[in-house]
Image (cartoon, rainbow, N blue to C red):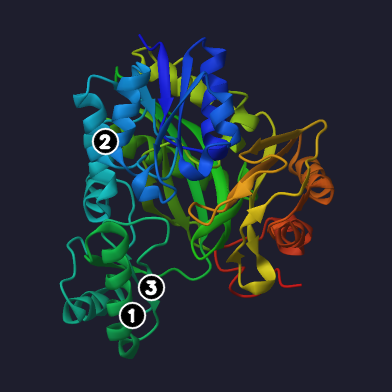
Amino acid sequence: MIHAVLVANRGEIARRIFRACRQLGLRTIAVYSEADQGAPHVRDADEAVAIGGAPARESYLNAERILSAARQARADAIHPGYGFLSESWRFADAVRQAGLVFVGPTPDAIRKMGDKIEARRLMTAAGVPVLPGSFEPVADVAGAEAAARVVGFPIMLKAAAGGGGIGMARVAKAGDLAGAFATAARRAQAAFGTGELYVERYLERPRHVEVQVFGDGSGTVVHLHERECSIQRRHQKLVEESPAPSLPPSVKSGLTAAAVAGARAIGYTNAGTMEFLVDEAGGFYFLEMNARLQVEHPVTEEVTGLDLVVAQLRVAGGEPLPWRQDEIRQRRAAIECRVYAEDPSKGFLPSSGTVTKLDLPAGEGIRIESGVEMGSTVSVHYDPLLLKLVAHGATRAQALTRMAGALDRCVIEGPKTTIPFLRRIIASDEFGSGRVHTQLLEQGAFNG
């Protein structure tokens, strides 16, 4: 039984988890850095514990300080949210070793999916299509050249321990390989503690479609349908939606079946997401698995009418999944825009400072998940995501109209934000028609 939950995170996701805890009558515990002492998520909790300095490595990435806070506050469960330590199998294991419940998958599942090469092997064994590429790390440029000769240019160099686009480099021809290899290895080493890389075929103009999966302790695994995540900048998602527009039913059924098979093959429990690239011919390939709650989970909640975080807490407490596969339906359409404190006119340079004006939209079909309020200080130390704006409707057209209106009414002053850029995306012919792929931004589709 879970009675008290510490959320090892901050901002909008901490507030979202606290809301689910309150629905279940669970005591809530926040942690905060020196920079976040007055943050909204701190006030949202029943209790709050300071865990260190503003830099994340001194606070939100410090596992021992988080575990100490859990002992101090008498927590019996820790929810990691997303980012920070959420996909650290060592942290998940330390939580369990401390006698606490980790609200997420097992350390073994996190480890397997965190090693991108092992994940490719496991998915191949489970019958899930993967992109042609190497199934071992490439030790040097010569090894990458040998793999590229088999795969064919262009290729992607990827960090074996990575994710989120870090340590990735597109290589168009053999002459570019040495420089790209050195850069990708250096970035991977800095971010993940290892510079190991592997090679994958690079797809031109693919769609990025992911499938929400959920497993429980009895071995049941279900999917909660797909999300379209092709609107990206440097492999970071900006806009997500469900259902994926114009996705052929045969492709969708293949994606969802592959996602469930892949999750079942590793004995996956709790919430997770299987990510795929879909080519122009409808072929799809496993990209990676996010062994945690996704930033864009509200899209799935609005479409299905289900509460993923409540289900996470219940399954972590030993309960079976509350849904059968045939009960999980896409009942409407939903779109999410991520609003970042970044300046699109300056190459999306992060923008910090005090929020001097905040006027958020409301109304039918509008949902806001925000980590800031009037007077909040946007710190340089953390991810610049301010809030998520979600619009749903009976149809995609209605959701799109509501999102356009919500963005027009959304006013944030102080830090620069991506709201003007998001307005251009939502108003574009490409997005409106659903003709999306991952390279639209780099091709200048949404430039003003």
Q: Position of residue 272 (x, y in %)?
A: 41, 36
The residue where tag 3 is placed is 169
The answer to whether residue 402 is visible is yes
- Distance between the Cα atoms at labels 1 and 3? 6 Å
Q: Is residue 269 at least partly visible in the picture? A: no
Residue 64: assigned label:
2
Q: Is residue 354 left or right of residue 201?
A: right
In the foreground, 407 or 6: 6
Please report the residue visible at 84 percent of the width from the left and 46 percent of the height from the top: 409
Which dot marks residue 180? 1
Say which element carries label 1. Answer: helix
Quadrant hosting residue 351: bottom right
| Few, some or many residues within 10 Å of mark 2 (<14, 14–19, 20+) | some
Callout 3: helix, strand or loop?
A: strand
Residue drawn at x 27%, y 77% is 148
* Residue at image coords 69%, 72%: 345
